[in-house]
């Protein structure tokens, strides 16, 4: 397993854990009140910060454990581009959805959460695509 494949797995796991933790906290705070009234800002920022810091820390540990595998070849670059293209689609979907929700006058809770869920989906699906291609082969167009 190359370093880039390990990084894809790390990012996938951290993204799922961070968003899952955020959803758990927000839904736990809801109780009987509507979701739009739940305080979500701090939980959202903490989960994003934890995901970033956790990814960096885990990638450093993995890279230090296997220093000889730091070389990136052409296949790694192609797989990275493919995964990034898959993930970027969800960033665009989230931005368009948030823009339309803002135009329609939706509550900030829903706008922030659609952006966050699309960022999480972008990371998850982009890294799933990378993991699948590492296990199989690059598609030939």
Image (tube, rainbow, N blue to C red):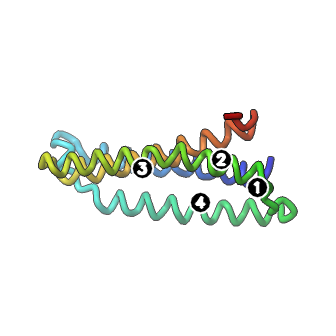
For the residues labelled 3 and 4, the Cα–Cα distance comes to 19 Å
- x and y, in percent, of residue 118 in the image: 40, 46
Residue beneath the point at 30% across and 47% down: 96
Residue 47: quadrant of the picture: bottom left
Residue position for label 1: 3
Local secondary structure at mark 3: helix
Mark whose residue sits in front, 1 or 4? 1
Rate crowding at label 1 as few (under 14), some (14 to 19) or many (20 or more) other CA atoms within 10 Å.
Answer: some
Q: Do the residues labelled 3 and 1 touch (CB within 8 Å)?
A: no
Rounded to the nearest angstrom, the CA distance separating label 2 from label 1 is 10 Å
Q: Do the residues labelled 1 and 4 touch (CB within 8 Å)?
A: no
For the question of whether residue 20 can be seen, the reply is no
Secondary structure state at the residue bearing disc 4? helix
Q: Position of residue 8 (x, y in %)?
A: 65, 49
Left or right, residue 114 beside residue 87: left
Relative to 118, does residue 51 appear above or below in the rendering?
Answer: below
Question: Which callout, 3 or 4, points at the residue further toward the start of the chain?
Answer: 4
Q: Earlier in the sequence, mark 2 or mark 3?
A: 2
Q: Distance between the residues labelled 2 and 3?
A: 20 Å
Q: Residue 9 carries which label?
A: 2
Labelled pair 4, 2 in contact (Cβ < 8 Å): no
Residue 59, percent from left and from top: 67, 61
Q: Which residue lies furthest to the left in this view?
A: 105
Q: Residue 55 carries which label?
A: 4
Label at residue 91 = 3
């Amino acid at each position: 397993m190359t370093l880039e494949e390990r990084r894809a797995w790390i990012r996938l796991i951290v993204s799922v854990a961070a968003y899952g933790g955020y959803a758990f906290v927000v839904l736990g705070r809801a109780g009987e009140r509507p979701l739009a009234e739940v305080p979500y800002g701090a939980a959202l920022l903490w989960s994003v910060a934890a995901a970033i810091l956790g990814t960096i820390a885990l990638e450093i540990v993995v890279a230090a454990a296997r220093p000889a595998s730091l070389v990136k070849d052409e296949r790694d670059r192609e797989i990275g581009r493919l995964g990034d293209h898959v993930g970027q689609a969800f960033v665009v979907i989230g931005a368009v959805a948030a823009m339309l929700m803002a135009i329609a006058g939706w509550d900030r809770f829903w706008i922030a959460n659609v952006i966050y869920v699309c960022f999480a989906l972008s990371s998850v699906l982009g890294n799933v695509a990378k993991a699948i291609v590492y296990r199989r082969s690059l598609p030939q167009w």
